[in-house]
Structures are given as structure tokens and as C-alpha cells.
């Protein structure tokens, strides 16, 4: 499957819509073990991306992801802005001068997630958004070349949900939640939930387009 940046308009709008729909839920998750501002920061960043979505859709893939990254860096507050910006800029760097198909994007996404891990000095298993992003990146890279697109997208949704749900039983070791110690157990991480919601919304758009 060849991928064109035009689809970015729909993907950005879908991400914005699903976070708006679940904003109070995500905020409550964050208030349980964090400072409660995660969803506000994500909403702020998505609002900017919605405003830029037509411009982004007219760029080549590398330039579009680079602009996404810079917008996240400058417009999303807290750690999320820096981490998501790093992810997107990592994707952009890997896509430069390449014709993008599913496998090329899978490799670039994995590169971006690795850059985020390095920036945050974190990995899956520490009750963060990486508990969704790492397994999704792995599944995408492993199946991008062999699985039919519908099967791949359905798998990615299931992997994202499983990753999000796994954070409930984890002990937080990063961010404000880490100060709670064992009290962080029994709560789903807000960043994992918002990441899962966005990934599932994106997959749903791509399933409809397929």
C-alpha cells in the first residue's frame, strides 16, 4: 500500500475528536496518579494540528512529520510535548528522501519510538505511553510486510488496548506518579490511555479508507 500525506487531514481530525470525546475520562485517570493536566496539554497540541492539517497534507511525508514534531515541541506543555515531538521528529528523519509504504513507515515509526525512549530515559514496563507505543511499533514492524492491511490495523488496535490495560498492574517509575510508590498500582496510565485512543482512532480511519 502506498501512502500519501493527504490522509493526514483525516487522521489529525480523528485524533482530535477521540480525545475530545474521552477528555474527562483521561483527566480523571491523570488526577488519580498525576497532576491532571495531561489531557489539557494534548488538547492544546491537537487544536494546533487541526488548524495546520490542510497545510500538513500538502507536504511530503518527511516534512509533514517534521512540522508535527516542531508543533508538539512548541505547543504541548509538560513532558508530553517534548516526548511526542521527539517521536515525530524521529519519524521525519527516517522518512527523508524515501517513498513511503507500510514497511517504510513501520521502520520509521520504530525509529521515532526509540528516539522517544532515549529522550525520556524510559521503556515499556514503566507505566507510561511507551507501554502502548513500544508494542504497537513492534507489531507494526513485524507484520507490515506480510499481513493484509485490514488484519494489520485490527492487530494494532488490539495491541494498543492490551498495552494500555497492562499499565493498571504496573508500578510507576517515571514522572509524578513515581512518587506514589505502590499507590500507583491499580490505575491505568493517562498517557497510555490517550495514546491508545489516538492509535485506535487512526486505525479506524485507515480501515474505512481501505
Image (spheres, rainbow, N blue to C red):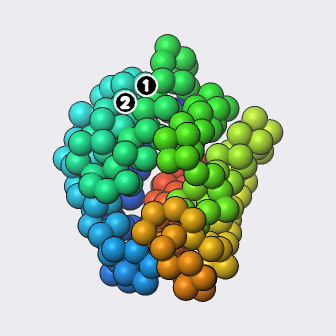
Horizontal side, residue 115 vs residue 45: left or right: right
Horizontal side, residue 125 vs residue 95: left or right: right
Disc 1 and disc 2 in contact, CB within 8 angstroms = yes
Residue 77 percent across, percent down from the top left: 27, 55
Please identify the residue farthest to the right as the structure is shown.
Answer: 146
Residue at 48% across, 73% down: 179
Residue 75 percent across, percent down from the top left: 23, 48
* Residue where numbered disc 1 is placed: 62
Cα–Cα gap, marks 1 and 2: 6 Å
* Residue where numbered disc 2 is placed: 66
SS for callout 1? helix
Horizontal side, residue 173 vs residue 54: left or right: right
123 or 106, nearer to the observer: 123
Quarter of image, res 41: bottom left
Please identify the residue farthest to the top as the structure is shown.
Answer: 97
Quarter of image, res 19: bottom left
- Crowd rating for badge 1 (residues with CA inside 10 Å; few <14, some 14–19, many 20+): many
Closer to viewer: mark 1 or mark 2: 2
Residue at 52% across, 62% down: 174
- Let me know if residue 9 appears in the view: no
Residue 11 percent across, percent down from the top left: 41, 50
Residue 35 percent across, percent down from the top left: 34, 74
Residue at 60% across, 82% down: 182
SS for callout 2? helix
Amino acid at each position: 500500500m502506498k501512502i500519501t500525506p493527504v490522509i493526514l487531514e483525516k487522521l489529525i481530525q480523528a485524533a482530535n475528536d477521540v480525545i475530545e470525546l474521552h477528555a474527562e475520562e483521561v483527566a480523571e485517570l491523570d488526577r488519580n496518579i498525576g497532576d491532571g493536566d495531561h489531557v489539557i496539554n494534548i488538547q492544546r497540541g491537537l487544536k494546533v494540528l487541526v488548524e495546520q492539517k490542510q497545510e500538513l497534507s500538502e507536504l511530503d511525508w518527511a516534512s509533514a512529520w517534521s512540522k508535527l514534531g516542531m508543533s508538539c515541541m512548541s505547543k504541548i506543555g509538560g513532558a508530553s510535548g517534548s516526548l511526542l515531538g521527539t517521536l515525530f521528529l524521529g519519524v521525519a528523519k527516517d522518512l527523508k528522501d524515501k517513498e513511503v509504504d507500510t514497511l517504510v513507515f513501520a521502520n520509521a515509526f520504530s525509529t521515532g519510538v526509540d528516539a522517544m525512549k532515549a529522550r525520556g530515559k524510559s521503556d515499556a514496563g514503566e507505566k507510561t505511553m511507551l507501554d502502548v507505543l513500544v508494542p504497537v511499533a513492534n507489531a507494526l514492524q513485524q507484520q507490515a510486510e506480510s499481513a493484509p492491511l485490514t488484519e494489520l490495523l485490527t492487530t494494532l488496535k488490539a495491541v494498543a488496548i492490551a498495552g494500555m490495560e497492562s499499565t493498571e498492574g504496573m508500578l510507576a517509575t517515571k514522572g509524578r506518579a513515581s512518587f506514589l510508590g505502590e499507590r500507583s498500582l491499580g490505575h491505568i496510565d493517562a498517557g497510555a490511555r490517550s495514546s491508545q485512543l489516538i492509535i485506535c482512532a487512526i486505525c479506524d480511519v485507515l480501515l474505512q479508507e481501505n
